[in-house]
Image (cartoon, grey):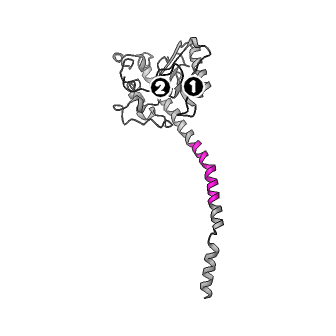
Amino acid sequence: MNQALQKCVTRATWAFTLVELLIVIAVIAILAALLLPALSRSKAVAKGTICVSNLKQIGLGLRMWNNDNGSKYPWQLTSAQGGSQDSPEWVDHFRVCASELATTKILVCPMEKDKQVAADWGTINGLENVSYFAGLTAQDNKPFSLVSGDNNILGGGGGLNPHWNVYLAGSIDAAWDVTVHNERGHILLADSSVQKLKTFGLRDQISEAISGGTTNVVISKPQGVD
């Protein structure tokens, strides 16, 4: 009997009371509430880093293509010249230099939930598989001109081909929406640098491109087949 009683006492000593169990649950809930926002921010930062890396690789690929094609970007040459200017498929702006870009994966920002990586260059579609715009008026001898960047830009007359010109002076209305990097975005410049900007930084960058000699700044957002 003494041994049986001792076992019962031992088990009772190690058991949680209801109050202790509630305290443990409360502590775990508090720790989770403190850690989850930090984890979310870390995840967003990691995805932002991937986006920057994507644009740097795109910049390198376009630079190599540019060097082999008279300092022109694909969208500045006709299909007869090896470019995409007159192509009915918007995605050809990037597909014509597939050899330099290597993989379709770099065309998708991981923060853009509505975009998916295309299985290959043959099935890629601009509207579904590309996150970045084409800077139609970019020039490699104008380092501040916009070559590419996140496509969640508002303003510029709206539509899929926003534009800003020298006559607007200080009235640049470009802005990032909240859908990708929370009212921020990345821009690839002709000097191959990638800038992370808020809305006012984006406007300053467009103004700087105009001041650098680009009369019209025109970008083309991802689109489907014409």
Q: Amino acid type of disc 2?
A: Phe
- Residue found 41% across the figure and 23% down from its top: 93
Q: Residue furthest bottom?
A: 1
Disc 2 or disc 1, which is closer to the eye? 1
**Magenta region, main secondary structure:** helix
Q: Looking at the figure, which quarter contains the N terminus?
A: bottom right
Confirm whether the magenta stretch covers residue 31: yes
List x then y, in percent, for residue 74.
41, 20
Where residue 173 appears, x then y in whole percent? 58, 20
Q: Which residue is mark 1?
A: 175
74 inside magenta stretch: no
Q: Which residues are magenta?
A: 25-42
What kind of residue is marked 1?
A: Ala
Please tell me the numbered disc located at residue 133: 2
Q: How many numbered marks, from 0 up?
A: 2
**How many C-alpha atoms fall within 10 Å of the one at disc 1: few (<14), some, or many (≥20)?**
many
Chain-order first, disc 2 or disc 1: 2
Residue at left offset 46%, top offset 18%? 136
